Amino acid sequence: MKIFKDKISLQKEILNKPISFIPTMGGLHKGHISLIKRSKKFKKKTLVSIFVNPRQFNKKSDYRSYPRNKLKDVSILKNLNVNYLYIPSIKDIYGFKPKHKIYLDKFSKKLCGKFRKGHFEGVINVMNRLIQIIKPKTIFMGKKDYQQLFLIKKFISRHKINSKIIECNTVRQANGVAFSSRNSLLKPNDIKIASRIYYFINKIKKKFDVYNFNFLKTEMIKLGASKVDYIENYNIKKNFIKSKKYNKNCKIFIAYYIKNVRLIDNI
Ligand code: AMP
C-alpha cells in the first residue's frame, strides 16, 4: 500500500488510473471494511482517504474528541491490500479554490441539518475537494449516513461530475448497533443502551403513525438515551418525503445522545 500525504504526489501516481474511492474519517471498523471489500471486487485501484474534516464539526470539542487511531487504521488497510491511502493535511485540502461551487439540496435543512448547523456545507465542501483531487470513477459510501449520501449524490448530479456512487448497506454488530467510529467513545453499558434503542425502533416502526415525537423521545430516554434530536420517518424511494405511516419504502431516522456521544442511524 502506498501512502500519500500530499495531493501532488498522489495525483502523479494515480494519473489516468481508474480509481475506486472510499472517503473516511478513520477510526476504521467493520462498516468501513465492508465498503473497502466491495471496492476490491471492482477492477479499479482502491484508494482510501483518512481525513477528520474540521469544517463538518459544529462543536470544537467534538472535533477534538473524534476517535483517531492512525497506526491501527494503516495496519487494517494494509491487511485489506488497499492500493493507496491518502492522509492529507488541512492545508492540502483547503489550500486551493475548487472548481465547483458547493451545492446543497433543500433536504440538507432537515434531520441532521437542523441540529448541526454548517455540517452538510462542511461535508459537501470536503467531498468537492476530494473528488477534484482524486477524480474517482466510483465512490463507495454507507447508507448508515443516508442523508449525507443523498446530498452528495445530488451535488454530483448537479455538477454532472463523472463519479458514480455505490451505496453500501449498514453493517451492524450482533446486537443491532451500527458500527461507528464514535462507538469507541462508549462504555459496554452504553452499547447496551444503543442496542435497546435499535430494537425499540424496530418494534414500533410498523405503527409509527400511532406515536408522537414526545412519546418516542420519552421512551428512548427511559431506555438510557441522554437526549434525542429527532425520530422521523421518511420515504426514501420517493425523493425523501416525510411520511406519517411506515412502509417498506421508509426508514426511521434517529439521532440521539448517550452521555455526550451523538449517534445516528436509520432503521
Ligand atoms: P466516516 O469515517 O464515519 O466518515 O464514514 C466513512 C464511510 O463509511 C461513510 O460512507 C459511511 O456511511 C460509511 N459507514 C460508516 N459506518 C458504517 C456502517 N456501520 N456500515 C456501512 N457503512 C458505514
Image: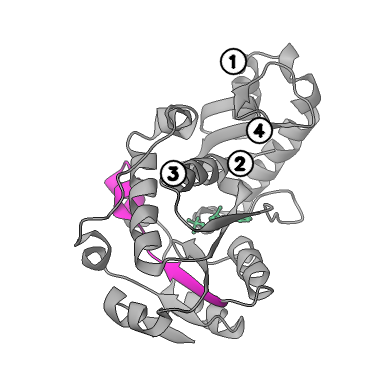
Hey, what amino acid is under mark 2?
A: Asp
Q: Which residue is mark 1?
A: 214
Image quarter of residue 254: top right
CA–CA distance in space, label 1 to label 4: 24 Å
- The residue depicted at 40 percent of the width and 68 percent of the height is 134
Q: Which residues are magenta?
A: 45-63
Q: Which tag is nearer the camera, tag 3 or tag 1? A: 3
Q: Secondary structure at mark 1?
A: helix
Q: Are marks 1 and 4 in contact (CB under 8 Å)?
A: no
Whether residue 56 is visible to the viewer of this picture, yes or no, is: yes
Which callout, 2 or 1, points at the residue further toward the start of the chain?
1
Q: Which mark is residue 155?
A: 3
In the rendered structure, does residue 122 fall within the stretch colored magenta? no
Q: Position of residue 258 (x, y in %)?
A: 53, 40
Q: Mark yes or no: residue 225 visible.
A: no
- Report the side of 125 relative to 109 (left or right): left
Task: Specify whether 66 is left or right of 204.
Answer: left
Between label 2 and label 1, give the one nearer the viewer: 2
Give the image location of residue 255, x and y in percent: 54, 35
Residue 265's label in the rendered image is 2
Q: Are marks 3 and 1 in contact (CB under 8 Å)?
A: no
Between disc 3 and disc 4, the foreground one is 3
- Per the model, the C-alpha gap separating discs 3 and 4 is 17 Å
